[in-house]
Image (tube, coloured by chain):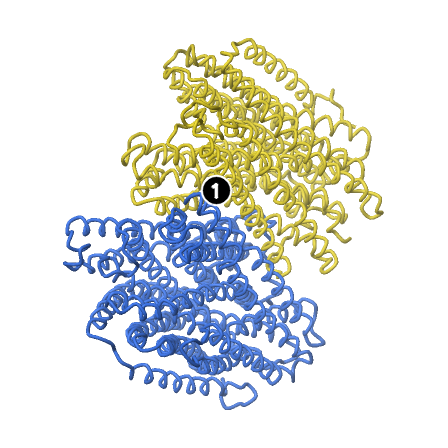
Chain colours: A blue, B yellow
Amino acid sequence: MIDILDFDNMLFMIPIAAVIALLFALYFFRNIWSRDKGTPEMQKISNAIETGAMAYLKRQYKTIGIISIILAAVLALAGLIDSFKEYLGPMVAVAFLIGAGFSILSGYIGMRISVNANIRTASAATVSFKDAFVCSFRGGAISGIAVSALSLVGLFAVVFVYDAIISETMTKTLHAVVGYAFGASFAALFAQLGGGIYTKAADVGADLVGKVEAGIPEDDPRNPAVIADLVGDNVGDCAGRGADIFESTAAEIIGSMVIGTAVIAAAGGLGLSYNWVFLPLVLMAFGLIASLIGIFVVRLKDEDSDVFKMLNRGYYLTIALVVASLAITTYYMLNKECELWYFFFGAGIVGIILGLAIVYITQYYTGNHKPVKGIAKSSETGPATNVIEGISVGLESTVLPGICIVVAILVSYSLGYLASPGGVDEASKIAFGLYGTAIGTIAMLASSAFILAEDTFGPITDNAGGIAEMSNQPEEVRKRTDKLDSAGNTTKALTKGYAMASAALAAFLLFAAFFEIVAEIRGETITEVFNVNIGDPRIFCGALIGAVLVYFFASLAIRAVGKAAGEMIEEVRRQFREDPGIMEGTSEPNYAGCVDIATRGALKAMVVPALLPILVPVSFGLIYRFMFPDISYMAVGALIMVGTITGILMANFLNNGGGAWDNAKKFIEEGNHGGKRSPAHAAAVVGDTVGDPFKDTAGPSIHVLVKLLSTICLVTAVLFVVV
Amino acid sequence: MIDILDFDNMLFMIPIAAVIALLFALYFFRNIWSRDKGTPEMQKISNAIETGAMAYLKRQYKTIGIISIILAAVLALAGLIDSFKEYLGPMVAVAFLIGAGFSILSGYIGMRISVNANIRTASAATVSFKDAFVCSFRGGAISGIAVSALSLVGLFAVVFVYDAIISETMTKTLHAVVGYAFGASFAALFAQLGGGIYTKAADVGADLVGKVEAGIPEDDPRNPAVIADLVGDNVGDCAGRGADIFESTAAEIIGSMVIGTAVIAAAGGLGLSYNWVFLPLVLMAFGLIASLIGIFVVRLKDEDSDVFKMLNRGYYLTIALVVASLAITTYYMLNKECELWYFFFGAGIVGIILGLAIVYITQYYTGNHKPVKGIAKSSETGPATNVIEGISVGLESTVLPGICIVVAILVSYSLGYLASPGGVDEASKIAFGLYGTAIGTIAMLASSAFILAEDTFGPITDNAGGIAEMSNQPEEVRKRTDKLDSAGNTTKALTKGYAMASAALAAFLLFAAFFEIVAEIRGETITEVFNVNIGDPRIFCGALIGAVLVYFFASLAIRAVGKAAGEMIEEVRRQFREDPGIMEGTSEPNYAGCVDIATRGALKAMVVPALLPILVPVSFGLIYRFMFPDISYMAVGALIMVGTITGILMANFLNNGGGAWDNAKKFIEEGNHGGKRSPAHAAAVVGDTVGDPFKDTAGPSIHVLVKLLSTICLVTAVLFVVV
């Protein structure tokens, strides 16, 4: 039984963090809601966005809900089969539903806040830049806080209750709780993919006809796709990203806790406490408080303050507080049982540095540096050379992160390995090594509330800009929102780097959790079963299937955007053709038609790719269970691991390639290589459009995909293991 | 000592095949050389092509030569170090130089024949389609025969001589002979990459300014880049592909032979004969004869004969003869020592079927079927949707081949495993399983002379068309060469599918050969050392580095084309601008300027990427040797294996994406979606241009890269193994 009043395990920090988070969220909420809601014209636009977004989310959640219930039923019924009953059944099914439900709820909260903050930001922009920034950043902050707190508290509650009900070992409890991680990843993949298709179909469609063909500015009210585009920012960037971060946190904390149980089992003779299991939860609680403080200090002094300087101040404060929390938790929770506890502190620092390093590398490849300037220059010779250069930059941008990840894994693993207490045998040291990577991952993720606040701030400002443009605000208002929008674009790109780094470092942790469960099922220790020999051709085939799966998924995601965008283009062209009054500004375009196309396109196209990472590993594992029972779980392991390697690199390629194209276009728009309306600009628009589904649909979805691959296998491990 | 007169080992087939090949080649050679060399105008163009190609190859071979000599010196000197002397030293260095030299020679022969056949094909086209086809196909055939025969005979000669000099076990001999495979792969990568950059820089440059900007037809003599473009076909498609197929054959036969020794060692008690080692050589000898017969029957009945029907007749005859040879060799060489010899016959059939299946899948994705038509349709909404759709098709096209490869590996491995003679223990059965995949690979490769003939036929007809166009031949002549050119494009795409399939199936064979050498060094059996547990984070990092390497290489290769093409475009624009007489046809453009840009661009850009697959695994292995000596060779194994998986999928994506874009453009040119000069056509040209470096530079180079990764590690294995 978990004793929350046992001060040694520090679990009391979780309710404390939750209460503080609630207070902060309420404060920001009141602060935003008390602001001016703008002119009736602004409200009309904002309402249209809200209606569109709600209509989409309602249908999306319905689809997710139906599939979730079917999956939950399967999980519950599988428990009736005798050999599965210990690892599947109603407890897992309920955890799955709670995980999926909370994931959806996170996205929903993010979206609701965003649609309310955007209009207030637009209104504040009529007065001052400073106010507009505070309003949009705090809007993002509520989202970040809500998602992080929900993830932490929800998970803790499930662990607490399940522990009481199952009342056996923590290992048994966690086997049921993995359903929560699976549910979270499952819902997140749908949300991220569906939202990603929606937002890019609308964006590409609006841009290609509006900006390129008709020559009207972005967010011009004459563009029939403009409302769909603004809705897309909410359902894709806010709701999608919220669900994504929620599932990252959930999956990675559970993975770390499972590794904690593996450490205790491996060092059986030492009688280690559950502190090893709870440390990830406690560290995240501290991290949430650190992020809150970081968020709180972000404010502008005056109209000319540098947004990035302020954001960075908050970020570095958060990081400093996380480092302090890391020292406190590792010392307080581990020092009695592990002389070299500070090696785990070191492993955490490795994770934090990796996060920073990847954010900087992302900035180098997608900011105004050599790669982006190279793409801009290649635009002079046309769209083809622009696309060639952009793809080349995207591919290259995987190299440094890959090397950083390798170094981080090796160092954090070695630190954990070396920290093993005396009396632990060679094989069991591996469990301590894995725990080192787990601490690295959690330390990196501890600042996620701050990161998510920065990320959600982007679409809020984007929407505010759209509202300002559509309600014909004076030039200076639009200038303020543009400045915010540009800052938001950069923070968005950085978040993707961060999400990628966390997915990469966490990967190992989830593999290890999978093998810990396999070990439990087989009644062995993790070091006995954690063997994925891809030198065995049958296991190698698992690896190949994992890699192919990622390619197939990427193909479907990218194509879905192309297809829906094509339909959007046809619709906008049709409206312009059939009603010339639209371009003249005398009649209002049919916004709802475009919203409907994006909605249908996204819903239709998301189901098959989102089911792939569930159906492929499970059916592969079942086939192998019958064909090669003695190695089936290893082949599934190879599928997950090589699928993850492929996914990380592919996501990195897509995200950075897309980001670089985007900024190359902006670089030209700043007056380089002929500036706006030059042939180079036209070429850069092509690259930017190609990059849209890369960076906002396929790339971020693949982050979720790799984690879903692991969590589905965590839950269904018993199917592939023949004892 | 190898006894060539021992009829049991059937090695006598090798000189027989060589003599027959020589006779055929001479016959075709006389047949072509006796043909008309065309008008003086044609000769002038042909000479310009030959001069450009020779100038490039001379410089390219010089670069390869210098680096080869340095590498050979390193290999030779490393033998002075005591612990390396058994596996490195002058014997390996000499084998390396012979392999590299023969690889270059293959490319050179292919190119010489091509530049002589193209003008005769152009001249024949003034008379009849039938003659033009025979001339170009036989030109390609000489190339195919020469490369295959050189590969087989060269390898056999080295094995024979080394066996006599070393006069120890066959295993020791093969350890030195692997240098030959490394040399072949090494030179092939330079040839394929350098040639690929050259040809696409010229092609992209010529097309973008000529066809798109200036609106003149392809191969128009007014285009300053036209000669460079025609030279590119020779140095890229002929010389590059020749070296590629040479190294495939060499590396894969040696790999199979090494596995043969592993089988003998694993079944130590049974005293198996060297037939298991020689079978791959003998089967290739039969395959060469089969291809010769297949080539011989390809001829057109009359002017309206269907080219593909004739080519297919030859191909299917070749396949039938290979199947017969497979039955003869497996029965005659294995039946006395293996009751279930026909399981190996079955494994060979699996390889042949895989080859056919992948060729069909390639045809589906790059021919006029649903995917290509989808790209054509998406061109209606502009270049961005065209590129998005093309990338999506390319990614998707990896799925079916991936599944086919998985099935082929599983079946051929299982057949070999099940065929293990009685008395072999469980662990040693793995060696027989691997031998099954080896037979599959060799059976697939046995028809390579025919495939290469079909492939080289493409650039010959392409050049002939160019010569006809530039020498202002009448419309009907151009029509004949166009018809040939279109057939050549299709065969070229199919060859790439075939090369990919062979690289994929061969991959396992080369990994196994690597571990067999590791086993020798450690004094263990292959089944004891063949463990690549990517569950160990340190080994996992090797896997990640392997994957990153492929991305980096692809990035550099694609960028090199973009950069050189950009320079080419500037040069062509400059010439048009400074001398308006060029467009009016009154003054001759400066062809040499463009040839020079392509030459410099290719030479400058090829060195770094071509050295990557040598430097990365060796330095990674050396770092690991010192950091983690007990698992260093396993981490190198993971690097090779996951590098290969990534490479196969990436190459497939690039090749098929590029091929599909190309044909989507042609589909529009046939009058669909508005036909030539429509906006859809302009969009399709962008996609086609993006696809150029994909399908003709990066994609085919990655085929070679994955094999080079294995062969370099085969040679340097002793560096990573701590006994």
Q: Secondary structure at mark 1?
A: helix
Q: Which is nearer the eye, A685 or A536?
A: A685
Q: How many marks?
A: 1
- Asked where in the image residue B47 lies, by quadrant, the reply is top right
Q: Where is residue B577 drawn, in percent x and y?
A: 45, 34
How crowded is the residue under tag 1: few (<14 C-alpha within 10 Å), some, or many (20+)? many
Q: Where is residue A285 drawn, in percent x and y?
A: 49, 81
Residue at label 1? Answer: B654
Q: Is residue B445 visible?
A: no
Q: Is residue B466 visible?
A: yes
Q: Chain of mark 1?
A: B
Quadrant (top left, top right, bottom left, bottom right) of the N terminus of chain B: top right
Vertical comparison of B392 with A344: above or below: above
Q: Where is residue B119 drawn, in percent x and y?
A: 51, 17
Position of residue B16 in the picture relative to residue B406 (left or right): right
Q: Where is residue B690 drawn, in percent x and y?
A: 44, 41
- Asked where in the image residue A196 lies, by quadrant, the reply is bottom left
Q: Residue at x 41, y 16 (%)?
A: B473
